[in-house]
Amino acid sequence: MSADTILDFAISQEEEASMFYLDLAARVKNPGMKSVFEDFAREEQGHKARLETIKAGGVLHAPGQKVTDLKIGDYLVDINPDKDPLDYQNALIIAMKKEKAAFRMYSDMADGVADPGLRELFLSLAQEEAKHKLRFEVEYDERILSEN
């Protein structure tokens, strides 16, 4: 598989993630969570732009530090956003699981490329997705788990 094909796939995944968060933002009633989801949509667009820059021959930035994983989302039941009510708790669960899947995707992509620059890019993006998941896990811990 060529680098362009891999980058095109990653670009499409970031676009899909951005649309996913905009959809969640439109569906939640909590104004604070709406804003959070809109912010995440913008971040995903930033990832897309970064990938497009790399594809066009731009400079690669080194990955950040490894992000802590609270693993809260790992133990929660999957939510179907089309069938289950989209309350605050369910929106957080969906977001955590989406970010975990994105982390795995980029980690797998890093493992599957020979080019060291692409590998570093995918590892960096995996860490960005891990940061997103952590933010949702912290929110879940503070707002949902602490209330029970």
Image: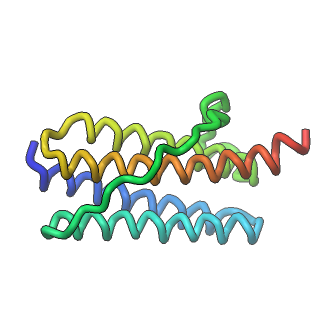
Q: How many marks?
A: 0
Residue at the image position 65 percent from the left and 28 percent from the top: 75
- Extreme residue in the right direction: 148
Q: Position of residue 43 (x, y in %)?
A: 47, 66
Where 15 sits versus 67, above or below?
A: below
- Against 134, residue 73 (above or below) is above
Q: Residue at x 47, y 50 (%)?
A: 129
Q: Residue 119 sits in which quadrant?
A: top left
- In the depicted view, which residue is nearer to us: 2 or 80? 2
Q: Residue furthest top?
A: 75
Q: Is residue 53 left or right of residue 47?
A: left
Give the colour scheme of this rendering. Answer: rainbow
Image position of 139 with respect to 19: above or below: above
Q: Residue 10: give x, y in percent of width and height.
A: 28, 53
Residue 134: image x %, image y %? 61, 47
Work out whether 46 lies above or below 123: below
Q: Is residue 1 toward the left or the right of residue 12 in the image?
A: left
In front of the other: 18 or 64: 64
Q: Is residue 113 left or right of residue 24?
A: left
Camera-nearest residue between 72 and 77: 72
From the image, which quarter does the N terminus lie in?
Answer: top left
Residue drawn at (55%, 53%) of the image: 132
Corner quadrant of residue 70: top right
Identify the residue at horizontal 40%, vertical 69% (top origin): 46
Where, quadrant-wise, is the C terminus in this rendering? top right
Across and down, in percent, residue 30 comes to: 77, 66
